Image (cartoon, rainbow, N blue to C red):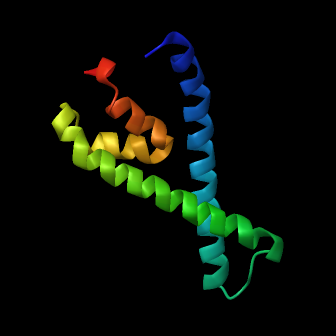
Amino acid sequence: MRLRYKQILLPIKLLSIVLILTGIGLELWNLSANFVTTQISESLHPIVWFARFVVGAHLIEGIIAAYFAPRKNKIAFKYAAYTFFVGTVGLLELFDPENE
């Protein structure tokens, strides 16, 4: 990978991890509020739906990484978890010919 490309990946990875954990936390908060028959603020509903979409997309990316990781001599579960948290960057690194 080019140096400039590598330099921008670290902030993207860190931001992705923070946002995925925030999305998971928001969904857990919503589920716990529904469990005790209260509701979160109406203004947060679009954010919760967007977080569900993003977590679902990251889950699909993690499944793809788990499928292809053994073919690249990587441990499937570890790389799937890594890709779940960093998103598309993990898949880009998995399929980068320079990483082989």
Left or right: residue 21 versus residue 91 is right
Question: Which of the two residues, 18 or 83, is positioned nearer the viewer here?
Answer: 83
- Pick out the residue farthest to the top: 3
Residue 38's quadrant in the figure?
Answer: bottom right
> How many marks overall?
0
- Pick out the residue farthest to the bottom: 37
Q: What residue is drawn where x is 57% and y is 50%?
A: 20
Residue 11, placed above or below residue 75: above
| Image quadrant containing the N terminus | top left
Q: What residue is drawn where x is 56% and y is 57%?
A: 54
**Residue 26 on image: x %, y %:** 65, 63
Left or right: residue 10 versus residue 64 is right
Residue 37, placed above or below residue 94: below
| Image quadrant containing the C terminus | top left
**Residue 73 on image: x %, y %:** 18, 31
Residue 99's quadrant in the figure?
Answer: top left
Residue 4, placed above or below residue 23: above
Left or right: residue 76 versus residue 7 is left
Q: What residue is drawn where x is 48% and y is 13%?
A: 2
Residue 84, placed above or below residue 35: above
Residue 93's quadrant in the figure?
Answer: top left
**Residue 89 on image: x %, y %:** 47, 35
**Residue 81 on image: x %, y %:** 38, 46
Left or right: residue 3 versus residue 75 is right
